[in-house]
Image (cartoon, rainbow, N blue to C red):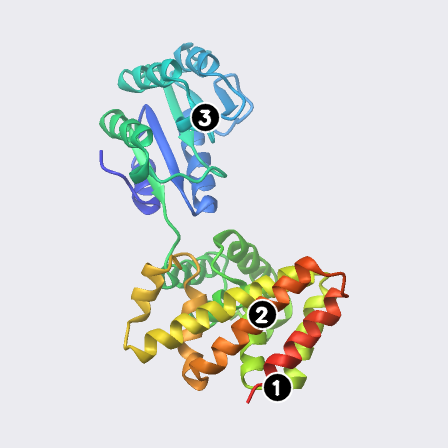
Amino acid sequence: MAVLSNAELSKSLRQGELFPVYFLYGEETWQMEKCLAAIIKKTVGRDSSCFNLQQFDGSRASIAEILDAAEAYPVMANKKCVTVGDLNIEKLADKDYNLLKELIKDPPETTVLVLYHFSLEINPKKSNKYKTLIGLIEKSGCVGNFDFLTHAQLEKLLVETAAKSGCTLSGYLAGYLIDRCGDSLAVLMTEIEKLCCFTDDGGEISKEAVDALTAKSMDASAFDLSKAILKQEYGRAFHILSELFDQQLEPLAILGALNVSFAAIYKSAAARTEQVQMSTVIADFGYKGREFQIRNAFRDCSSFSIRQIRQCIAILAEADRKLKSSRIDQQTLLEFTLTQMMALK
C-alpha cells in the first residue's frame, strides 16, 4: 500500500481495515497521537491496560524484547497490539536491523505492530535503512505520513471542530486564531476547546473572546513587535516588549524570535521585489508548518524598505553577540536595541 495521509489513514480505520504493521512518522504529532490511539482501540478495544497491549520505548527496548512481544499469542482475544515509539533505525546493529526486517516481511497474523516517531525526526528519502524498511512495510502493512496541515486545512478543521461542539466559528476568525496562536495543531485544539466552553451552545465565537481567552504565541508577538519597530511606533513597540517581559520570557528568546521575524520579512520583501510567489518562498525556505510567518510578512512587507530591514537585521546580530558575550543587563540591552532600530532614518 502507498504512503497514506492522516485523512486516508483515518478513513481506512473507520472502514474497518486493520493492517499487521504500521509505520507512523511526520511533523504533526497531534494527529499522529490520535491515529495511534485509534489503531490501539481498533485492535484491543477501549481497555488500554489490558494484557494484549504492549508498549515499548524504542530508545530503551531491545529488538529481542520487541520480537518476543510481537510473536507471543494474545490472551483470550483474536489480536494483540505492540507499539514501539522512536526506535532509531539508523543506530540499529545490522543483526537487529535484519531481524526487524524479517518480522515485517512475515508479520504474525495475531499481532498489530505499530512503529511510530513522535520526537525522533526522520527523512526517509535520505536514509537507505528507513527507505528499505518503509518499502517492506508498504507491502505487508501501512505507512502514515503526518505532514503539517496547510493554512486552509487548519481553518477548515477549526471551523468543523467548533461546529461539533455546538458553536459557530467564521473562516475569518479561524484564520485570525491561527495568526495569533501559530500553526501548532495541539495548541489550536486546546484554544478552540477553551473558546467553545466559554461560548453558549449554538452561539458564535467572537473576536473579543479570541483576544480575551487565547494566548498569543511568541512568534506572533515578535512579528507585531517587528512591525511596530519598522513603523517607528515607539509606544506600541515598548508595550509589546513589556508584555513579553511580563510573561517571564528570556531576553535571548525574545531576540531569537525577533531575528526569525525579521528574516521572514526580509525574504518576503526580496521575493515581492523580484515578483516571486509566496508559495515558492514557503517551499524554498522550509516554512511548511510555519506558513503564517511568511503570509503575514508578505502582507505587510511592502510598507518597509529592504535597506531599513537589512539595517535592523545587522543591529539584531550585534545585539545577539553582546547578549551572549557580555555581562550587560540583558533587558536593558534589548530595550536599547529597539531604540537603535527605531532611530533609523
Residue type at tag 1: Ala
How far, Cα to Cα, is label 1 from label 2?
Answer: 14 Å
Residue at numbered disc 1: 343
Q: Front-most of 201 and 273?
A: 273
Is 160 left or right of 226, judged from the image as shown?
Answer: left
Q: Could you tell me which residue is drawn at 45 percent across and 14 percent down? A: 69
How far, Cα to Cα, is label 3 from label 2?
Answer: 46 Å
Is 283 left or right of 194, judged from the image as shown?
Answer: left
Counting residues from the N terminus, which is met first, the one under dot 3 or under dot 1? Answer: 3
Residue 206 visible in the current orientation:
no
Q: Could you tell me which residue is drawn at 56 percent across and 55 percent down? A: 190
Crowdedness near tag 1: few (<14), some (14–19) or many (≥20) residues, C-alpha within 10 Å:
few
166 above or below 122? Answer: below
Identify the image quadrant of residue 134: top left
Residue at numbered disc 3: 83
282 above or below 302? Answer: above
Residue at numbered disc 2: 316
Residue 95 visible in the current orientation:
yes
Counting residues from the N terminus, which is met first, the one under dot 3 or under dot 2? Answer: 3
